[in-house]
Structure formats: C-alpha cells, structure tokens
Image (cartoon, helix red, strand yellow):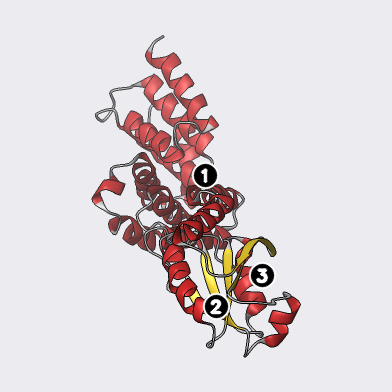
Amino acid sequence: MEPLLSTAAAPPADAVKDTDTAQFAVDVIDASMTTPVIVDFWAPWCGPCKQLGPALEKAVLATRGKVRMVKLNIDDNQQIAAQMRIQSIPAVYAFFQGRPVDGFVGAVPESQIKSFVDNLVKMGGDPSDAVDQALEQAKAALDAGDTDTAGALYSQILQAVPDLPAAIAGLARVLIAMGRTDDARKVLDQAPDEARKTGDIAAVLSSLELAEQTSGQIGEIPGLRDRVARDPADHTARIDLAMALYGAGDAGAAIDALIESIRRDREWNEQAARKQLLKIFEALGPTDPVTVSGRRKLSSILFS
C-alpha cells in the first residue's frame, strides 16, 4: 500500500533528494500525487544554482514534509531536461498530482522562494485533512470487515502522528477483531498517559475487556438459553448469555438480555447487569444506533 501521509513532526529523511532519468517518474510524478514536489534543474558549472539550491532546500525542509524537493543534474540527465524544455538554469518546476503547476527560472530572492513554497503548501492542503480522511477510510474498512486494509491504514497514520488516540484505538480494534487480544493490550499499554485519558482509548479498553471476558463463551449460548428459559430469575445465566451474545457479535441481543435482568432486579449482585450494560455502551460508542436504542430502553425501565 502506498503511503498516504507524511510525518508532521519532522521532515522525512528523503524530503530533499537527488534524482535521475530512471527515477524521475517515481520521485516526481508518483510522489506528487499526494505531496507537491519541487524539481531543481541544475549543473555543477552553474554559479547561480549553487546559491539558489541551498535556499530552496531550507524552505522545503521548513515545511516538514508538506513539500518535497528533488535535484536533477541536467548534464547527466539530458533526456529529461530536453523533455521539460529546459533552456537555461537554474530552472525550478513544481509538480502536484502528476503535472507541473508552477515554476520559475533564474536565481530569485529568499522572499520569493518562501512565497513559492508557501503556495505549494496551500495547494497540497492541510495535513490534518489527510489524517482525517485516512481515519475515515480505516474505520470504513474495519466496519466492512477488511482488517488488513484497516490495520495498514492505522499503522500509516501512527507513523505520521504517533500519539494520535483515534489511530491507537483503531489499531487496537483491528487486533481485537482479528482475535489478537494480547497484541491489542500491548498497543494500548504503550499509549501515552494523555492518550489513555481520551474517550477513544477508554472505549477500546472496554471493547478489549469484553473481548477477553467473552472469549470461548459463544458455544455456551444454547445451554444458557435453556437455563434462562427454565428459570427467568437466574440472573447469572442471563448475564452470561448476554456476554456470550456480545462475543458472537449480537450486541443488540446482549443489551436486551441485560436490560431484562435490570428490569427484574436492578440491584442484583451490586447492579452487575447495569455495569456490564454501561461497558457495552462505552465500547460501542455514544452515537452507535445500538447504543442509542439501548439507552432509550434502559431509561424507560429506570424512570417508569
């Protein structure tokens, strides 16, 4: 999978690099599909090139990955220079989304260089937009059951923004969905303290606890149903049934079972059913339709 994001905290190691005829398509055309790329056409004998190059590199590095730069020696790569119709140097072209979008010829003052690069940053868009878009794509993939794609996307996001709670929680959810609860626990344990205080992490911690609690219980559903049918007041069986149903992916039925236990005896075992219900609500998230419906049913019992 091609990288979707560039690291915001520091410029990438290859933010400024040399290129040649063989690598031009990859370093410029392909790379510019997501990030503006400046091409500095130069030659060793060009005096103004030696002045412009360092100033251009400085401005590019200051963008911390929002703009990249490649340097092409026209003496060694005459074919590319001819294709770009380079007649004098220094010549600078900017590419975005695979095509030239701006450029200039000759040495220019630093103020003009800064303005040139700043315009490319604006053209490339706010990196936070790319992060938000990647998060949406990852969540959609996870919701669709495509854990491989979701995991790859969340990993890319964390390479760019290592402490982002939504991405940490997302990767943990992927691992839970894959049955790798031990790995999910490691991901969450490594999260910074501030991240662990967020709702995203709290929700996935509840999901992890529920996954660990319900592991291996799915096969017990028929027997638990029989126990509840024989004795509707058997709260242990009803709550165990609810957790087994949750583990089987039927959160709605799990919530209904817990609410029925609360309706029959809300104080049983120090409100055990209510505590499990709130944990499921937290794991699903406050805007999940199943949570909204469950809270409405709970309210109708508590306040009737």
For image coordinates 41% across by 37% down, the residue present is 280
- The quadrant in which the N terminus is found is bottom right
Which mark is first along the chain, 1 or 2?
2
Real-space Cα separation, disc 2 to disc 1, in angstroms: 68 Å
Front: mark 2 or 3: 2
Front: mark 2 or 1: 2
Task: Determine whether 52 is above or below 227 in the image.
Answer: below
Q: Which residue is mark 3?
A: 29
Label 1 Cα neighbours within 10 Å, binned few <14 / some 14-19 / many ≥20: few
Which mark is first along the chain, 3 or 1?
3
Query: Is residue 266 among the parts visible in the rendering?
Result: yes
Q: Which residue is mark 1?
A: 222
1 and 3 marks in contact (CB < 8 Å): no
Nearer to the camera, 168 or 268: 168
For image coordinates 63% across by 84% down, the residue present is 74
Which disc, if any, is residue 165?
Answer: none
Badge 1 amino acid? Pro
Could you say where residue 228 lies in the image, as x and y percent from the top left?
45, 33
Badge 2 amino acid? Lys
Snapshot quadrant of residue 98:
bottom right
Q: Is residue 121 left or right of residue 161?
A: right
For image coordinates 52% across by 44% down, the residue present is 222
Q: Is residue 89 left or right of residue 203?
A: right
Query: Is residue 238 among the parts visible in the rendering?
Result: no
Snapshot quadrant of residue 302:
top left
Q: Which residue is mark 2?
A: 71
